[in-house]
Amino acid sequence: MEAQKEAQRIMTMSVWKMYHSRMQRGGLRLHRSLQLSLVMRSARELYLSSKVETEETELSFAAAPLNLPQPMTAAEAGAEVDSPQAIEEAIPAPEPMETQDARETEPAPACSHLPPVTFATLPQLSMKANRKRRSCTLGQGRDAGLIPSKKARLEEETVPAEGKAEVEAGDLGRRPSQVEEGPFPSLARVLQKRFSGILNNTGGPPKPTAPPSCELKPGCRQADNMINILVRTVVAF
Amino acid sequence: DIISTVEFNHSGELLATGDKGGRVVIFQQEQENKTQTHSRGEYNVYSTFQSHEPEFDYLKSLEIEEKINKIRWLPQKNAAQFLLSTNDKTIKLWKISERDKRPEGYNLKEEDGRYRDPTTVTTLRVPVFRPMDLMVEASPRRIFANAHTYHINSISINSDYETYLSADDLRINLWHLEITDRSFNIVDIKPANMEELTEVITAAEFHPNSCNTFVYSSSKGTIRLCDMRASALCDRHSKLFEEPEDPSNRSFFSEIISSISDVKFSHSGRYMMTRDYLSVKIWDLNMENRPVETYQVHEYLRSKLCSLYENDCIFDKFECCWNGSDSVVMTGSYNNFFRMFDRNTKRDITLEASRENNKPRTVLKPRKVCASGKRKKDEISVDSLDFNKKILHTAWHPKENIIAVATTNNLYIFQDKVN
């Protein structure tokens, strides 16, 4: 538990540092970004491994359905501040949805909302911070997986983070029946899919198709289709 | 302003510093006073000039900092001095020359420069040079730009004195000092897919004697030695220096503290020294699998890595340097401490560069950090170290025991006691 908290704290810190490093004069430092992502990855691995250990205790939590928990906001805060750029920053869909097939469980402290950051798009973000998000113009083939597009994406890791997450949690009852248009349609769609799956007792989200880059990352758990977390290590210039 | 680099020239007479504002300040050692043989000359300001200005990359919407990352002196060939200075993107060759005479007695011009009315000229005279107050001029002779996509971290002049290398995070380029419009790329570690990037280049240096050999260090703690005779693109190393990690020291931050922040060849060329976050290692070029000597700079920080990550200190890039005879190495630490390790006696010393604690001409008192347990008198506990006071840049006179130590805003010059 302590290790988990510590790991989460470090991940939060790392996200903040990544964000702030973008604001620095002289632009993004590749070495610094790489080091931050390495720490993030270590923290994530520790977090996940300690999470697995405590998983049994979490299962006993009765939860208000689909309530995105407090701890998420801390982890999200770093990404949240980014909001114009936050679109491309990834947050996995709530873990309980991933780990329980048909159960509505409160994720509670086990907020595994690791805020992986998709570095590949960071430099592009800094340029386009104030522009409208264009779903296709930013993408090279490899970036396509990172940018939420208007098409429904199944369990893509790159669910955008946003401050509305908590609000949306409350709206989730309405979600299945309404498609959220607006700046972050993909989040809505993913949430919709997940939660409607739970509500309909369909056994949870379908197996995700791992993006190609996942195969290259030893830390990526393809086998674990319940945890869709992707950490990209690198800033592309 | 914040000092970002310190470098003695080849004779040791001149000491250049670069700062975050893009300025270069050069100090010159006074000529030894014949009557006072017990003290060597002091260093006084010789020249100050603005080397780099802030620029803006319109394509990427990024500001290019004017901070001077490195200065390297060229060996002196004539009366003028030359140095290379670099910021993140552009390298400049500066000529520093003295003027102590000026011509007087022109026929067509007055002394203040105004032109005389030709009709008033009735006689002719030959202009002569008369002494004037010494003026030191710095002028940019070459500008080497637009060759680096990433941030330049090193420059190193080849022993052929015609070429030099510049290294950024992913590439190393070879330049000729006379040619500014092109350079050769000799190392490129950029992966085809940037998402596969696992390491970056952190420092590079030419061998002091072999003009075909250079080394570059990486963020993973490895050093690669390359031979330019082997191929045009030195992506395959000739030697790889790497020490296996001690598994008992493994932690969250193991990877980032193993990143090498500086690499320096010994003057002899037989050894090289690397600095990572906690230690200094001496490598014999003939042995790749481990260093021949390892010196712990501030091992007491190993248990504080999390806090150091929080306050960003874990990213500090410390430099290191050799003395002229390669018998002592020096590097900086926190709390304005700097450390020297004598390779022969295996003794080390910690000294402090601060005005409060040391008056000029007093002998520096050795300092000690108490890692844990009862603190002895005069010891400083780890928790009371000031991590904002860091010594990242140090330099050692090539011939004498004179050292230059840069704290954040100040430059200290120490010399050993001459009896």
Image (tube, helix red, strand yellow):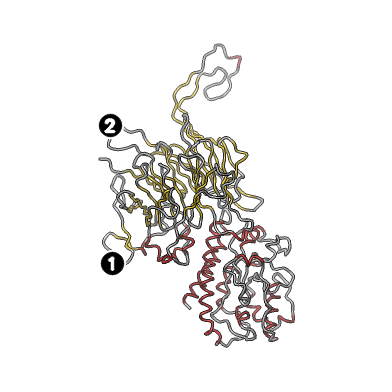
Q: Residues within 10 Å of mark 1 (few under 14, many from 20)?
A: few
Residue B374 has which mark? 1
Q: Badge 2 sits on which subunit?
A: B
Q: Are the numbered discs 1 and 2 placed on the same chain, yes or no?
A: yes
**Residue at 43% of width from left, 48% of height from top?**
B286
Label count reads 2
Q: Which residue is mark 2?
A: B35
Residue A136 placement (x, y as % from top left): 73, 63
Residue B280 has which mark? none
Q: Badge 1 sits on which subunit?
A: B
Q: Residues within 10 Å of mark 2 (few under 14, many from 20)?
A: few
**Disc 1, disc 2: CB below 8 Å?**
no
Q: Earlier in the sequence, mark 1 or mark 2?
A: 2
Residue B341 placement (x, y as % from top left): 34, 51
* Image-quadrant location for residue A15: bottom right
Q: How many angstroms separate mark 1 from mark 2 (CA)?
A: 50 Å
Towards the viewer: B363 or B46: B363
Check the image and name the residue furthest to the top.
B123
Label 2 secondary element = loop
Residue B72 placement (x, y as % from top left): 48, 41
A121 displayed left or right of A10: right
Residue B356 placement (x, y as % from top left): 33, 52
Picture quarter with the C terminus of chain B: top left
* Image-quadrant location for residue B37: top left
**Residue at 54% of width from left, 11% of height from top?**
B123
Label 1 secondary element = loop
Check the image and name the residue furthest to the left.
B419
Q: What amino acid type should be assigned to the residue bearing mark 2?
A: Thr
